[in-house]
Image: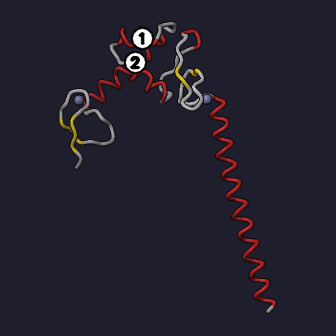
Amino acid sequence: MDVRNCKKCGKLFNFTGEPLCPACAKELEAKFFDVRTYIYDNPKASMSTVAEEMDVPIQQIKKWVRQERLAFTKDSGISIECENCGRAILTGRYCSECKKKMTNQFSSMYQEKEQQHASGIKASSKGKMRFLGE
Ligand SMILES: [Zn+2]
Ligand SMILES: [Zn+2]
């Protein structure tokens, strides 16, 4: 069993991939809903205002935004950077351009594999033909 110290309160707990003990994780989850409500009620509040008012580190707010759990409106003027090109985005990790590029890359990789697979079949059937002709 992997036992660690909670990053927040320092108590020992059974590590399950989260750096916080269950009590602190629960607290953070409750905080998340508070923050979400606050942003909903104050769509124009800046990230530092939200952090200050809600007593949550800005890094934590950004993390939620990266996870696409929180989203700021365009009116708020709050944005985070695309992790690939640095363009300002409202939520998630990448801008729509980079997301599109990544999907294209993925599908072309898939097509290449398919083609290799197809030519592999052709080569082996040729080999068989030769064998049969002997
Ligand atoms: Zn804790
Ligand atoms: Zn981008």
- Point 58% across, 20% down: residue: 88
Categorize mark 2 by other alpha carbons within 10 Å: few (<14), some (14-19), many (20+).
some
Q: Is label 1's Cβ within 8 Å of ligand 2?
A: no
- The number of numbered badges drawn on the structure is 2
Q: Residue at x 28, y 32 (%)?
A: 20
Q: Residues within 10 Å of mark 1 (few under 14, many from 20)?
A: some
Amino acid type at circle 2 is: Ile
Left or right, 22 with respect to 46, comes to left
Residue matched to label 1:
48
x and y, in percent, of residue 42 in the image: 47, 7
**Mark 2 or 1, nearer chain start:** 1
Q: Is there CB contact under 8 Å for labels 2 and 1? A: yes
Q: Which mark is residue 108?
A: none
Residue for badge 2: 58
Residue 11, percent across and down?
Answer: 18, 32
Residue type at tag 1: Ser
